[in-house]
Amino acid sequence: MPSPRGPTKVRVAIVDDETLIREGLAALLSLMPEVEVVAQGRSGREALRIAEEQVPDVLLLDVRMPGMNGVAVTRRLHARNSPVRVLLLSTFPHDEYVIEGLRAGAWGYLLKRTDSDRLLAAIQAVAAGESVIDPAVTGRVIAHLREGQETPVFHERLTDRERQVLGLLAEGASNAEIAARLGVSEGTVKNHVSHILGKLGARDRAHAARLAVEWGLLYDD
């Protein structure tokens, strides 16, 4: 007679560009019989690959990473209807990405100072389809809802042409150079830039270029 199977472990992947934190989390979780660490990564690109190839139950994802940050990754997974549930991790309780992360489709938001018992409880809750928000950031979320604020970033999807212009803008090209590269008039480029700034909520060209990198807007879907 076969022995009864034990409780199913939660399959977790960890993505953080800081090696000490990533490996520390992996070591901690490996001691928990309820969890199985299936993969580790250090960038947004790796997070997308891991989500597609390993399909973990929960993706522990750092918010602030160079290149494609955690919110951009979350948004892309949500757009792809990925079954992977994202639990975002941040160092700061007043991180500007708290609201953006939840809007992007994250199932939870925890601070990295969270103790092991709360981390395990959060992982299990998210795996079970429950949302988790660190008590330290709950007040920020409530205040945001009360004030009815709109997210300042990525209000509308950029058109293919706008993404082309944004890519060249991020490379430091002038309007004249962009016009020459795309075979359009400089006035048309100015209109595109204006639309891009409005859609991204960017202050200027430099701000738009920074957002393009941080939010992964220049990567193919």
Image (tube, grey):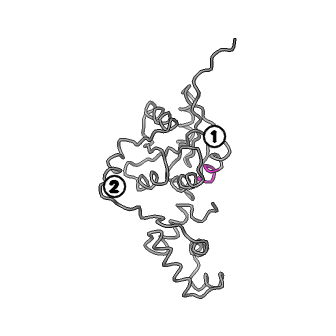
Residue at image coords 48%, 44%? 107
**Lower position in the chain sequence, tag 2 or tag 1:** 1
Residue at image coords 51%, 74%? 196
Badge nearest the viewer, 2 or 1: 2
SS at circle 2 = helix
Is residue 47 within the magenta segment? yes
Q: Specify whether 130 is left or right of 9.
A: left
Residue at image coords 65%, 14%? 3
Quarter of the image for the N terminus: give it: top right
Residue at image coords 57%, 64%? 217
- The residue that label 2 is drawn on is 144
| Quadrant of the rendered image containing residue 36 | top right
The spot of residue 23 in percent (x, y) is 57, 39
- The residue that label 1 is drawn on is 39
51 in relation to 177, above or below: above
Nearer to me, 62 or 3 = 3
Q: Which amino acid does label 1 sit on?
A: Ala
The magenta stretch spans which residues?
44-48
